[in-house]
Amino acid sequence: MDIFLQKGILEEYQQEYVSSLFDKIEQLEVIIVNDQVENLDLFKRIVHSIKGSAGSYELDFASLVAQKLEDFLEHASFCPVTQNSPYEGMLPFIDLWKEYLGSFNITATTRPSYRSLKETLFTISQKAEQKDHKVLIVDSAKSIRLLLAQTLMKLGLHVSQVGDPVEAIQRLLVEDFDSIITSQRLDKMKGNSLLGVIQNLPEIEHKPLSILITSDESIYGGPQFVADEVIKKDQFLSKKLTDLFQRLIINKKLGSPLESDEEKRKKLDIQSILVVDDDPDIHSLLKKAFEKEENLKVVYTSKKTEMLKLLQVRTFDLVLLDYYLEEETGDRLLKEWKSAHYYKKTPVIFLTASQKTEELEYIRQAGAKGILNKPFKPKGLFHDILKLLG
């Protein structure tokens, strides 16, 4: 009885909050439609407020939309000045909010599935992550972060930035970056110490190339010095960073943003793929994605037993594995394969629509090379696969 009472009270509070939230979203929409550049700070404050408060009312998806919109805003803030508007591409987020919150109206007869909402959110938020190579910038000074981000985006790199070293570690635990740039002077720890933590933390499996920015030359080459590259902090910082990344690209320490898919595939030697998914529609999509790839052999199966038999008698260069199979979850199946005597160190990429932190952690612990989020489109899919493998 008490549970239902509590549920009733929660729903009452939700209705009140949703009503006030609609007012905020309407305000955001007015700012976007009228291109009120002067209200950009207000726009950001409202979005941040929704991200923090919606979860308290168990409206987790509303909070998730706000988080994705903040990521989009962060990316847009580093775009070239030729961009038409700081709000360009944001209306789909507003529409998605409205669709979700409208289902809480007492007159609503249907409610969109959480999965379909997340799939829509994934699709529209991809615009904020179009670059191949990911760089994480860590600096307590926002002005330095902005300078570094603008410099790197001109080279065609995707940039994320944080001011807190603890937040940087949290990002690296759940997200792969090709390189990390940190200043030696940070609020909570020194930059070199941060790089040492990252280097020695086993949970961070993909170790990014580490770059330290410092004006203190005395720390160079010391016993605790772990940075792969060092840039002296002075008035030529932007030029030095550009020169460094161009050199890294030329020396293949970072893949060139101009490297073709054909060149990447040749370098990775991808000739055969095993697809394990019990959805025939996914098989059809993948066949369309791979049909133009010359000399690529792809085998499809929907059964656990058939997958294990194939892996026992054949060698594949890549396995695409669905997380939700009827017989078993993909992470458990991967662990079972790894314990078998015929296991080969074949890279595995998971196919999933899940955004649950717990399930994504299971996938990471199983040793996956990466994740392809459903839904996906055939066009560009093989490019995404090569990016994960590279």
Image (spheres, rainbow, N blue to C red):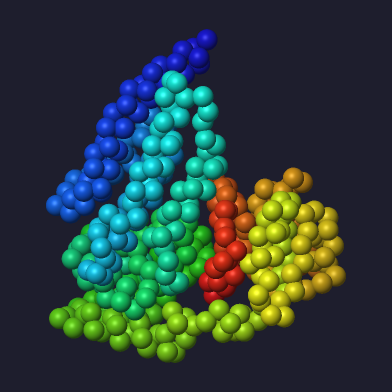
List x then y, in percent, for residue 54. 36, 35
List x then y, in percent, for residue 135. 38, 70
Picture quarter containing residue 283?
bottom right
Work out whether residue 225 or residue 362 is closer to the camera in this orientation and state it: 362
Horizontally, residue 158 falls left or right of residue 217, namely: right
Q: Which residue does the image show at 71% across and 76% down from the upper left?
A: 296
List x then y, in percent, for residue 179. 40, 73
Q: Which residue does the image show at 32% across and 73% down from the upper left?
A: 153
Work out whether residue 367 or residue 185 is closer to the camera in this orientation and state it: 367
In the image as oriented, which residue stretches furthest toward the front? 34
Where does the C terminus fall, quadrant-wise? bottom right
Horizontally, residue 203 falls left or right of residue 311, namely: left
Instruction: Count the labels in the image.
Output: 0
Q: Which residue does the image show at 72% across and 62% down from the upper left?
A: 275
Residue 221 appears in view:
no
- Relative to 234, say whether 195 is above or below: above
List x then y, in percent, for residue 377. 57, 60
Work out whether residue 231 or residue 70 is closer to the camera in this orientation and state it: 70
Horizontally, residue 137 falls left or right of residue 326, namely: left
Residue 72 appears in view:
yes
- Relative to 260, say whether 106 is above or below: above
Picture quarter containing residue 321?
bottom right
- Relative to 65, say whether 170 is above or below: below
Q: Which residue does the image show at 20% across and 63% down from the upper left?
A: 141
- Relative to 198, say whether 115 is above or below: above
